[in-house]
């Protein structure tokens, strides 16, 4: 609502009288969304370079992505497969748990 105001350590809504702590509001603002992490727990961002840590078979194809393959300029996407990348073998959506940040 537009009629909220700070009162000590709380915010107060003048319309309904509801009060809530300022700390909860700060936590909600800091939570921008999901953070994508690689297999070692490093946070991934758009444009990062990563390396495959496991051989991955491509479904519906005889292609296998080999361990140690370096992928440049990744893009983060939502869903089960968080990383969108372009490789010599084509464009792929990969899970971050099979990647290591370089």
Image (cartoon, grey):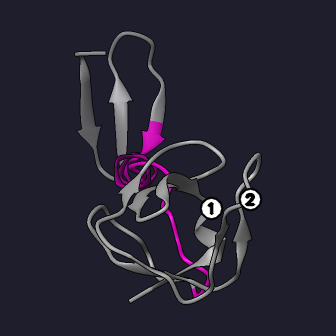
The reply, left or right, for residue 15 in relation to residue 67 is: left
Residue 4 horizontal/vertical position (percent): 27, 25
The reply, left or right, for residue 37 in relation to residue 10 is: right
What crowding class fits label 2: few (fewer than 14 Cα within 10 Å), some (14-19), or many (20 or more)?
few
Residue 102 is drawn in which quadrant?
A: bottom left
**72 is higher (above) or lower (below) than 86:** below
Residue 31 horizontal/vertical position (percent): 43, 52
Q: Nearer the viewer, residue 99 or 15?
A: 99
Residue under pointer 2: 62
Residue 2 horizontal/vertical position (percent): 23, 16
**48 is higher (above) or lower (below) than 84:** below
Q: Which residues are magenta?
A: 20-40
In reply to whether residue 93 is colored magenta, the answer given is no
Q: Nearer the viewer, residue 84 or 24?
A: 84
The reply, left or right, for residue 79 in relation to residue 86 is: right
Residue 79 is drawn in which quadrant?
A: top right
Residue 95 is labelled as 1
- Secondary-structure class at tag 1: loop
Looking at marks 2 and 1 on the same chain, the residue that comes earlier in the sequence is marked by: 2
Residue 27 is drawn in which quadrant?
A: bottom left
């Amino acid at each position: 609502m537009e009629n909220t105001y700070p009162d000590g350590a709380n915010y107060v809504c003048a319309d309904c009288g509801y009060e809530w702590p300022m700390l909860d509001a700060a936590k909600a603002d800091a939570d921008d969304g999901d953070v994508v992490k690689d297999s070692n727990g490093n946070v991934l961002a758009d444009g990062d370079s990563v390396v495959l840590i496991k051989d991955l078979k491509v479904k519906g194809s005889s292609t296998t992505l080999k361990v140690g393959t370096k992928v440049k300029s990744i893009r983060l996407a939502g869903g089960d497969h968080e990383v969108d990348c372009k490789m010599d073998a084509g464009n792929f959506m990969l899970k971050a748990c099979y990647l290591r940040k370089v």
